[in-house]
Image (cartoon, rainbow, N blue to C red):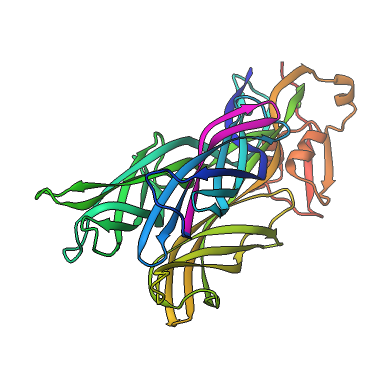
């Protein structure tokens, strides 16, 4: 006889780390660009280029890309842009990590500061935050029954666990053309661009992971006619695509993390040879995990009235997906412009980021505290400062109802800015409205005793002979026909037949007749 087995494969969280690092460097304005008269705006992005998992640590390398927009002449709308990159190499310590472990890493710019040193030199300082989740795959084989054997009673139980069906990373490339409106002059050169994504949605399908959303494009350009004022272009393009992922279907649970990759805006001619088309090329980095809930019958215990059967057990630690939820919260903030800034004539662009400051697990809920940081670019009433930027911070607190939680449960939060707008209730006031998507994945840690082998020896005949051949038994709390049969060298079928039991349910105080079974050869 031998045990029949079922293989269980799942992924356990090994480490979750958060760290911040700073970058700092000075840059000179190229000779081809004008002097810095007034700094207007900046933007930054962290691009991860390489990840190396080592013993107890992870080494990451990449660049912080930045761009600054500044005014070159205080008497006109003459603007320039300068960009560059600051390389970085950081080590994240994570006890227990081993080469080969799978890690998911998200990086984002939390703050970017630009200080003008003189008209030809400026300093860039940035604070980047890194979130790391390290997982390792665990596999075990648990007995489900006995093949080619008789006379052995088997007890099984249903066990539910989360199986990782797919885990992969991919890059989704997006390319769109934006033709400028007919009432705007031809493009001379692009001075500033800001490309962001909103309303991102993803779902598992039979052919892969389907991703859709909107790409919001803002461009400042200098017309071909040098006398013409600078122009502002806002456009939105919807997109959708499917990333191939084998072995998944629409009923499975998708847990993905989507971050923006590199982006570029260039100019090309239309069919008439006029430079009126903005060509936008961007990418999304997609970290995909697809789960399914699996239910299987595993052997829990065994005994025999004719042999001494002892199961060999091992402990299997695993994680179950307790909850996957996508929530939305609305964030609104009104703020007056500073007295040092000119009043607003028109808002030309608004962008923002979401920072999560604290995650507070409660008994049956999770309270998430964070802030939306917004940058509002506007045309001012001051001719000497025609373009200005106002920065706003809108804190929020959001409670997500959950199933009952335990201290050992792990919670992963992936925030995203779904929408952001800025309106003018008055000339000196801005109202920012944003919708924040909060993706929350909760895993619970469990342990399971698996039967991985068994030993079979002759029954202790002296001990068995000392047991009564037939006995009247009064059921006590905690008894089952299994425990009674095991104690008195009987069988489940014998107890059912002798006592005319239609089910295996017995109640305290119930009287049963137990007959000892004869040993088989």
Residue 304 visible: no
Residue 38 at x, y = what percent? Answer: 47, 61
Q: Residue shown at 60%/43% (left/top)?
A: 23
Does residue 433 sit above or below 128 in this rendering?
below
The secondary structure that most of the magenta stretch takes on is: strand
Instruction: Report the magenta residues as a range.
Output: 41-66
Residue 51 among those drawn in magenta: yes
**Which residue is farthest left?**
272
Does residue 127 sit above or below 313 in this rendering?
below
Would residue 151 be found to the left or right of residue 188 on screen? Answer: right
Frontmost residue, 390 versus 300:
390
| Quarter of the image with the N terminus in it | top right
Frontmost residue, 198 versus 87:
87
Q: Residue shown at 78%/46% (left/top)?
A: 512
Q: Residue shown at 89%/24% (left/top)?
A: 463
Residue 108 at x, y = what percent? Answer: 54, 48
| Quarter of the image with the C terminus in it | top right
Frontmost residue, 61 versus 490:
61
**Which residue is farthest bottom?**
426
Residue 169 at x, y = what percent? Answer: 46, 36
């Amino acid at each position: 006889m031998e045990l029949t087995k079922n293989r269980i494969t799942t992924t356990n969280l090994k480490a979750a780390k958060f760290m911040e690092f700073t970058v700092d460097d000075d840059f000179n304005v190229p000779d081809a660009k004008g002097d810095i008269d007034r700094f207007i705006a900046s933007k930054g992005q962290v691009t991860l280029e390489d990840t190396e998992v080592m013993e107890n640590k992870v080494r990451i390398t990449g660049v912080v890309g930045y761009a600054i927009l500044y005014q070159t002449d205080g008497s006109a709308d003459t603007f320039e842009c300068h960009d560059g990159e600051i390389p970085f190499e950081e080590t994240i310590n994570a006890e227990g990590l081993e080469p080969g472990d799978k890690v998911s890493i998200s990086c984002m710019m939390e703050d970017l500061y630009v200080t003008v040193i003189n008209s030809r030199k400026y300093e860039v300082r940035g604070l980047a935050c890194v979130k790391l989740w390290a997982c390792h795959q665990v596999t075990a084989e648990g007995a489900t029954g006995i093949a080619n054997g008789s006379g052995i009673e088997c007890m099984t139980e249903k066990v539910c666990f989360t199986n990782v069906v797919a885990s992969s990373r991919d890059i989704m490339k997006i390319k769109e053309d934006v033709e400028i409106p007919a009432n705007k002059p031809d493009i001379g050169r692009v001075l500033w661009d800001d490309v962001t994504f909103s309303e991102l949605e993803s779902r598992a399908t039979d052919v892969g992971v389907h991703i859709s959303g909107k790409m919001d494009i803002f461009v400042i350009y200098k017309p071909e006619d040098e006398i013409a004022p600078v122009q502002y272009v806002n456009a939105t393009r919807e997109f959708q695509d499917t990333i191939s992922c084998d072995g998944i279907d629409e009923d499975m649970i998708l847990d993905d993390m989507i971050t923006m990759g590199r982006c570029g805006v260039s100019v090309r001619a239309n069919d008439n040879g006029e430079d009126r088309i903005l060509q936008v090329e961007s990418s999304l980095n997609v970290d995909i995990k697809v789960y399914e809930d699996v239910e299987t019958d595993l052997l829990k215990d065994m005994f025999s009235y004719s042999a001494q059967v002892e199961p060999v057990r091992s402990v299997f630690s695993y994680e179950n997906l307790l909850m996957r939820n996508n929530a939305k919260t609305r964030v609104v903030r009104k703020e007056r412009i500073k007295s040092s800034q000119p009043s607003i004539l028109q808002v030309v662009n608004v962008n923002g980021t979401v920072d999560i400051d604290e995650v507070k697990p409660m008994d049956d809920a999770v309270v998430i505290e964070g802030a939306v940081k917004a940058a509002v670019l506007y045309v001012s009433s001051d001719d000497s400062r025609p373009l200005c930027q106002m920065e706003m911070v809108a804190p929020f607190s959001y409670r997500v109802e959950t199933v009952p939680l335990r201290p050992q449960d792990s919670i992963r939060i992936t925030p995203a800015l779904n929408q952001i707008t800025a309106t003018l209730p008055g000339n000196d006031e801005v109202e920012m409205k944003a919708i924040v998507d909060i993706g929350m994945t909760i895993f619970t840690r469990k342990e399971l005793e698996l039967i991985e082998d068994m030993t079979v020896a002759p029954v202790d005949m002296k001990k068995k002979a000392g047991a009564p051949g037939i006995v009247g038994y009064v059921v006590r709390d905690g008894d089952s026909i299994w425990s009674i049969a095991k104690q008195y060298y009987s069988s489940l079928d014998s107890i059912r037949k002798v006592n005319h039991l239609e089910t295996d349910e017995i109640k305290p105080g119930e009287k049963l007749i137990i007959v000892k079974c004869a040993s088989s050869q």
